Image: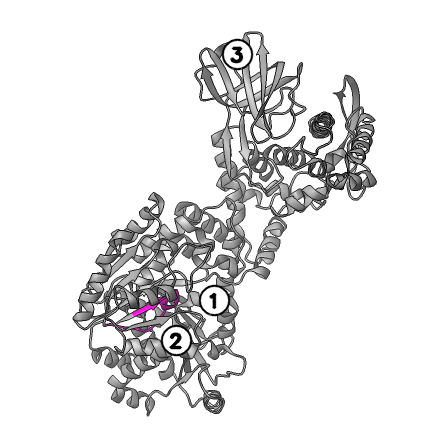
Amino acid sequence: MAASLHRDLAADAASALATLRNVLQLEEQRAYDDRAIVGGLARLVARLADDLALADDLLRRVQRYDEQNPHQRAATLAALRAATDSRKEPALPTPPATPEQTNAAPAYAVGGRTRTRKTIILNPDSPISALPGVGPTRAKRLASLGISTVGDLRFHLPNRYQAYPPPLPASQLGFQHLASFEGIVRRVDVAALPGRRFRITAILADSTGSIAASWIRAGGVPSGISEGLRLAVSGRLDTYGRQAHFDNPEFEPADAPALNTRRTVPVYPLTSGISQPFVRSIVHTAIEALPPIAETLPEWLRAEESLVSLNDAIRQVHWPDSAEELEAARHRLAFEEVVPISLLVLGRRLAWQETPAQRIDPPWPLLADFRTRLPFSLTRGQQRALSTILQDMAEPRPMVRLLQGEVGSGKTVVAAMALLAAVANGGQAAIVAPTEILAEQHLRTLTELYRGTQPAIEAALGRQVRLALLSGALSRRDRLQTLEAIREGEIDLVVGTHAVIEKDVEFNRLLLAVVDEQHRFGVSQRVALRRKGDNPHVLLMTATPIPRTLALTLYGDLDISTIDELPSGRMPVETTLLRPLGRANAYERVRSEVAEGRQAFVICPLVEGSAVVEARAAVTEYERLQRAELSELKLALLHGRMRPSEKDEVMQAFAAGAYNVLVTTSVVEVGVDVPNATVMIIEDAEHFGLAQLHQFRGRVGRGAHQAWCFLLAGNESPESLSRLEAVTRSSNGLDLAEEDLRIRGPGDYFGLKQSGFPMLRVARLTDLEFVQRVREAAGRILKRDPTLSEPDHAHLAAAVRALGSDAGEAN
């Protein structure tokens, strides 16, 4: 390990010195015109500063090179030559003498002489600059990759791999697409190319023949490519006539550890000024120099799950010996990522279930009367969901259930019956919506539903259900009166927006809280709502289906009910994908539907035009449509930059039929029910996720008439069209949610970044079998040790605590 470490360091410094000396010689030949290398001498020296270790005064002098006259430049070059000529061998930087220790290392050769160096034993918390060859410039660039300490290198994982074959003799090369070779450098030729670049061609030979390798570079010949050296190359092999030829292969000394050639090599995420060979070198150095990492999973679990050790997994994920060992390494690291998440959410579930709550006994006669007076019959999905919710609320522990179902599947009716049960038990209830428009719609819907069963409610309560709206639109006087009524228990059911969660809202006896469109609320807001009462039951509702794998992990602390069918008589929305030239067909449908007295939506990705994103903007499209395709219709504009009162006014006017077409942004994803709307046009549909497109589509077809949804593709790439075709094929929200998760990942799909959960580097939450296996393993851990207090679980307990301090709940 020590030999390879110092060989790498010596190579870096020697390469820098050789490059600088070549440029100095060329600069003198060009009479000091500062054009010997692209960007000039000062830029080159700044780039090589970490390896050259020049004095500060000389560095400052070189940085002014472009301002100097020829005589001054000649003197600067002379000073540089004197500084570099005195360097008979590359000097190795000395790491900080902090927690590190040094031990003797084997000898190695430099310049024909045998030298010894010291092995560096590093601490994972050592700054990245503790590694030789990482100066301030490189440290800053590595920090942009999330690498600040030496320990970070262990988990700077490759994003892919390049599989190079073992080396073959020259006589056996010629028919491979990728190949590797080891040989002595017999000759190096340099040819100038346009743009101040050079083609460097080396002839390599072994005992069976020779082969050429060429590189195109913007500098001198790398020091590792010189006559007499034994070189290893791997890369694409071309054949010209009878001569095999490597085109821009990776290379390294043949007697060095195979970090870049002759095996499967990692390909890492990079940033400007950082190369693959450099990252491979420092990752290898760190893994070799750092002490073994402590195991985090208990031995009994590793044995039951046949997991490789953490140290073996880290080595194999960087330099795999085989595809099977790479898969085993990735599986172990994926377990490492998901087990703490599963322990956290399952632990929360256990803790919440151990908290006492007020029981809500189902008022069966009242609910039966409510059902019989509905103008429709509940679907089987609604009946199942309602039965489960009522059972949960009858328990002496708080319910935390997620009710998911398509737009228009009847979640509100189920919630209305649960809310009525809470009020019939002498308590209060609340339903919270993300917008004032939706809150007002809920108030109207609930008022109408409860009016239908008024005699039964009066018989049960001795009065009607007392509802109140609490939103930011209330005047100060009305708000204070409403808050007083809620505090005194004079309000049975509060319908509102985020205003319900504010600190000055105090309930007299809150038994049930319902959160509609729960993904639109932040973690802190949902936690604040839970604290409003004495451990109230909580029902979360969403029209964005939760993929099964996320239901087992990020949502593992929730019970989930699904309404998997639409009310009878509801016709599916006919969905069509159109290229830009097919836009006229969509607007012809709008005009024909409006002529029949119906309405339409036009959704755009942006509010206003952008120089960065090529997509239609709502403001621009609204103005264009008024002049063009829809000039004879009444259009309205809605977007998120409008004041809340303006948005409410526009939406209410549209719902009332004052406008034929609403041109809007994604703000309409959660909006009022407009049964008269039968056409949905989505411009530049590829800018939206599949689940979001499904939500938009659910805004139409809520009445008795056939509805249409047109997906207009702005980007006609095969990938974009394939995604959009998935929406046209399926009307199943869960299927689209699964596909959306596969394409976009959990971070984008559910706002995971905002929730505080870590981004997963290895684990794939699209693998249902894997997720189920990890969840079962986490359950076995908690069954053995519910508090994670046993010594074998100390690392897991620390990981869960750290995760819990950052992570709230997934959206």
Q: Which residue is mark 1?
A: 353
Asked if 725 appears above or below 324 in the picture, the reply is below
The amino acid type, in three-letter code, at marker 3 is: Ala
Q: Position of residue 577 (x, y in %)?
A: 26, 53
Element type at marker 3? helix
The amino acid type, in three-letter code, at marker 1 is: Gln
- Residue at 64 percent across and 47 percent down: it is 143
**Magenta segment includes 537:** no
Q: Position of residue 656 (x, y in %)?
A: 27, 79
Q: Which residue is mark 2?
A: 647
- Residue at 43 percent across and 77 percent down: it is 644
Q: Which range of residues does the magenta coloring cover?
A: 662-675
Asked if 449 appears above or below 278 in the picture, the reply is below
Element type at marker 1? helix
**Within 10 Å of the Cα at label 1, are there few (<14), some (14-19), or many (20+) other Cα atoms?**
some
Q: Earlier in the sequence, mark 3 or mark 1?
A: 3
Instruction: Please indicate, yes or no, whether residue 809 appears anywhere in the rendered image.
Output: yes
